[in-house]
Amino acid sequence: MAELSPVLKQATPVLAARGEGVHLFDEQDRRYLDFTAGIGVTSTGHCHPRVVEAAQRQVGTLIHGQYTTVMHRPLLELTDRLGEVLPSGLDRVFYSNSGSEAVEAAVRLARQATGRQNVIACQGGFHGRTMGAGALTSSGTKVRAGIGPMMPGVVFTPFPEAYRHGWSEAEAVRFALAEFDRLLVTVSAPVDTAAVIVEPVLGEGGYIPAPPEFLTGLRERADRHGILLIADEVQTGVGRTGTFWGHERAGITPDILITAKGLASGFPLSAIAAPEELMGRAWPGSQGGTYGGNAVAAAAALATLDVVRDEGLVDNAAEQGSRLREGLRKVAAEHPVIGDVRGLGVMVGNEFTTPEGTPDTETAARAHRAAAERGLLLLTCGPHGNVVRMIPPLIVTAEQVDEAVGLWADAVAEVAPR
């Protein structure tokens, strides 16, 4: 008898039978408020009728049209639609299945286009579990441990973590950019540096937004030295942060944009976008894949983009995210064990710390379990697992936000030190 790998551990005890909107239901039909969204994937909620209808219709006509063998209409139409929401100038798209694959494609393109080897990644960033993407990841040692040596040519620069250091945001940005400049004269000369990759909000690293000044600083330095700026929007894209792309707040445009997760409401689909001239510098045969741009996933993505536009979900994410943070900060004010509440849009983290300011992993885990027992599904993140994150679908309502905050308040009150 075969069983799942023992390494796979569930974050919650739920055996899901069906999903509807912001809710999951187990086999006893108990309802759970799902503030995990499949790690930010079900952007339009579980089984949005328009996404379901588009996928069902496509399954009946063409399931798989391998896109270096034949072309199919859903992929062409999706590319046209993406052109309406991609940053200006990023007009060429390559599709794959997962965020990790898209990250690897972005790095491959950057190295081939520049003829340079090194890639600078931010400390605390998460970019995937494959060998190349894993080499860029430092959100926790579990991604890198026991599989070295890693892909060479990767160097790390600090991310501005104001709360961790007890600094103001401005101080954290000054430090991070100064260390980036130092790295260019001590570790990776600009003539050897192909790209810098950054998440607009650290994901697995603790749900820490990148201050706009940090992103503009990276953009300026990339321009000065001929380095490509890669925005990893796997988790932050498609409205999650209250803008369509997480980097928009900084008023910059990356050279390469990576998207996945919320793009197709649960169907495996990822992509990178770059300007025509840059994408044209990829070497022949360097882009491809059996399942990339799958017809059913493309149809679901088209429906997703339509729903996001027609239902005003980007604005809703901004509005409900503000409501969520306000509610969570009131909970934190009553329980000092929550040292920080932060995030953008419906991407919010609650960091648990001891009175001495060190990570309180145990209390975070207990609060996470207590919330699940009350019917609120959440996830943890951060290097120490002491950040409880909330990632509801973009369709979440004010009433559902208030329900979640109430359940969370009860869970924290149960486990917080007295």
Image (cartoon, rainbow, N blue to C red):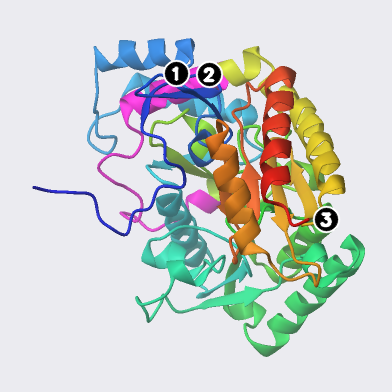
Task: Tell me the quarter of the picture where residue 220 sits.
Answer: bottom right
Alpha carbon separation for disc pair 3 and 2: 33 Å
Alpha carbon separation for disc pair 1 and 2: 7 Å
Give the magenta part as a residue range. 278-306
Amino acid type indicated by mark 3? Pro
Mark 3 or 2: the one toward you: 3
Q: Mark 1 points at which residue?
A: 47
**In this view, 231 is above or below 372:** below
Q: Mark 3 points at which residue?
A: 336
Q: Name the residue under label 2.
A: 21
In the structure shown, which secondary structural element does the residue marked by tag 2 occupy?
loop
In the structure shown, which secondary structural element does the residue marked by tag 3 occupy?
loop
Name the residue at 37% across, 21% down: 28
Q: Position of residue 4 (x, y in %)?
A: 23, 49
- Looking at marks 3 and 2 on the same chain, the residue that comes earlier in the sequence is marked by 2
Name the residue at 64% across, 70% down: 123
Q: Position of residue 118 (x, y in %)?
A: 54, 75
